[in-house]
Image: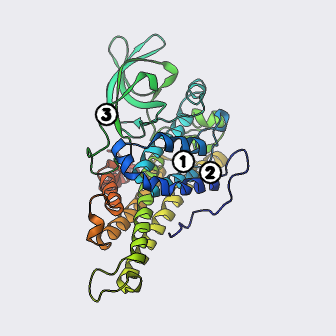
């Protein structure tokens, strides 16, 4: 199979903590097993306990978790690279993993020290997040009483917590703004509304709804929700003050989209792997029939697939690394890392998604009709990408309009 430009060749981990490259290599080693389990994972709506244990043992959930609380505190690009490799094995599993493990970034950026000690205290933090407001939170002594239902909580199957946004009210009924609540597993129910044939794709993403009934959330686990336009000032976020790492400045548009796009780059690599295998064993589909490895058309298509997928991965990682550099520049010089800059880099990583989606489209349409049969790997990757395209983050015109409004200082729509 063709290697990514960013796939390391490293020996087995020998130190106490694996290096980022070793984590990427561990994720790549799981690829055959993830592919073998694709049908089972789609039926389950998530991934098996065996694979969850593999992720735990490998340390994948700890990549973005602060060192102060037992994590590796590695870079956002390291997390994205691991996400790409898991998604290359199964884009749905990648989606579930990324959107469960990735919210360590938000907790480490925005929640206070008491909250972080509690949330990260057990060593593993996995939390889907739903920022579309739902439900209702009413203030009471020492916290809030929270009730509601939140859909599309991706990564819920093995979650230890959930992060949800709800409108909050004082005890007298006055609105007090949107807040994000961190709720432990014992206080929410995961509804059986995902997996099987309920959706066209991403069936293994464990994007279930969660129900919360009259849960008491202490004040330190409830924060004002403003992850896009918060002011950094000279002190940064609570997370920066606690960890002194500019990764935890919390600008969220680029990071959130990079999480999703990692699954699409992984899907492009998976489709290209399948196309490469078919090139080696199948004849061309049109006369004069010949092995695909001797067909000029298939070589052109394969070369284009490779170019699109390499470009998508390169662009995604470049956008994430530039994002990180803006945080470092703020720390070193005080130069503001603005919401507009975050929005512009969001647009960059979205272009990576477009390239990756084009690659899957090309692979699917040129691989031959047998690859469109239900149950074929190519058919699955095509379905998973189709599901991503329904996400609001893939509606390019909406986000392009938002970017322009940023530039002209106008109110945002998304």
First along the sequence among labels 3 and 2: 3
- Judging depth in this view, the residue of 277 and 137 nearest the camera is 277
Q: Which residue is mark 1?
A: 337
**Image location (x, y in percent) of residue 6:** 57, 63
Q: Residue at x 35, y 83 (%)?
A: 297
Q: CA distance from mark 1 to mark 3?
A: 41 Å
Q: Are marks 2 and 1 in contact (CB under 8 Å)?
A: yes
Q: Residue at x 59, y 53 (%)?
A: 26
Q: Which color scheme did the rendering employ for the protein? A: rainbow
**Image location (x, y in percent) of residue 398:** 30, 52
First along the sequence among labels 2 and 1: 2
Which quarter of the figure has residue 125? Answer: top right
Q: CA distance from mark 3 to mark 2?
A: 45 Å
Q: Which residue is mark 3?
A: 192
Nearer to us of marks 1 and 3 is: 3
First along the sequence among labels 1 and 3: 3
SS state under label 1? loop
The image's mark for residue 223 is: none
Which quarter of the figure has residue 226? Answer: top left
């Amino acid at each position: 199979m063709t290697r990514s430009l960013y796939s390391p060749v490293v020996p087995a981990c020998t130190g106490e903590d694996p290096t980022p490259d070793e984590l990427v290599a561990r994720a790549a080693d799981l690829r055959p097993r993830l592919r073998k389990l694709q049908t089972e994972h789609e039926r389950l709506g998530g991934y098996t306990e065996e694979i969850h244990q593999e992720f735990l043992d490998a340390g994948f959930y700890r990549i973005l978790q602060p060192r102060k609380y037992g994590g590796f505190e590695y870079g956002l690009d390291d997390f994205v690279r691991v996400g790409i490799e898991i998604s290359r094995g199964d884009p749905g599993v990648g989606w579930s993993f990324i959107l469960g493990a990735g919210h360590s970034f938000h907790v480490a950026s925005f929640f206070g020290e008491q909250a972080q000690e509690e949330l990260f205290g057990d060593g593993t933090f996995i939390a889907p997040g739903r920022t579309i407001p739902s439900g209702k939170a009413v203030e009471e002594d020492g916290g809030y009483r929270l009730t509601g239902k939140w859909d599309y909580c991706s990564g819920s199957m093995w979650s230890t917590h959930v992060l949800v946004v709800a409108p909050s009210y004082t005890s007298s009924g006055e609105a007090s703004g949107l807040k994000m609540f961190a709720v432990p597993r014992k206080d929410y129910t995961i509804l059986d509304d995902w997996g099987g044939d309920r959706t066209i794709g991403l069936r293994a993403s464990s994007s279930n709804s969660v129900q919360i009934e009259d849960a008491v959330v202490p004040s330190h686990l409830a924060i004002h929700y403003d992850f896009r336009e918060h002011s950094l000032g000279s002190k940064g976020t609570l997370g920066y003050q606690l960890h002194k790492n500019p990764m935890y400045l919390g600008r969220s548009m680029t990071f959130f989209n990079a999480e999703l796009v990692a699954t699409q780059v992984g899907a492009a690599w998976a489709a290209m792997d399948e196309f490469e295998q078919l090139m080696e064993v199948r004849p061309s589909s049109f006369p004069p029939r010949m092995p695909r490895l001797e067909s000029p058309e298939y070589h052109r298509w394969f070369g284009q697939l490779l170019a699109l997928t390499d470009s998508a991965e390169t662009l995604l990682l470049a956008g994430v690394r530039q994002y990180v550099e803006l945080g470092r520049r703020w720390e070193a010089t005080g130069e503001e890392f603005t919401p507009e800059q975050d929005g512009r880099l969001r647009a960059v990583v979205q272009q990576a998604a477009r390239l990756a989606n084009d690659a899957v489209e090309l692979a699917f349409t040129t691989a031959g009709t047998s690859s469109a049969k239900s149950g074929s790997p190519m058919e699955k990757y095509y379905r998973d990408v189709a599901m991503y395209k329904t996400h609001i983050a893939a509606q390019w015109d909406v986000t392009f309009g938002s970017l322009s409004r940023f530039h002209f200082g106008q109110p945002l729509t998304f």
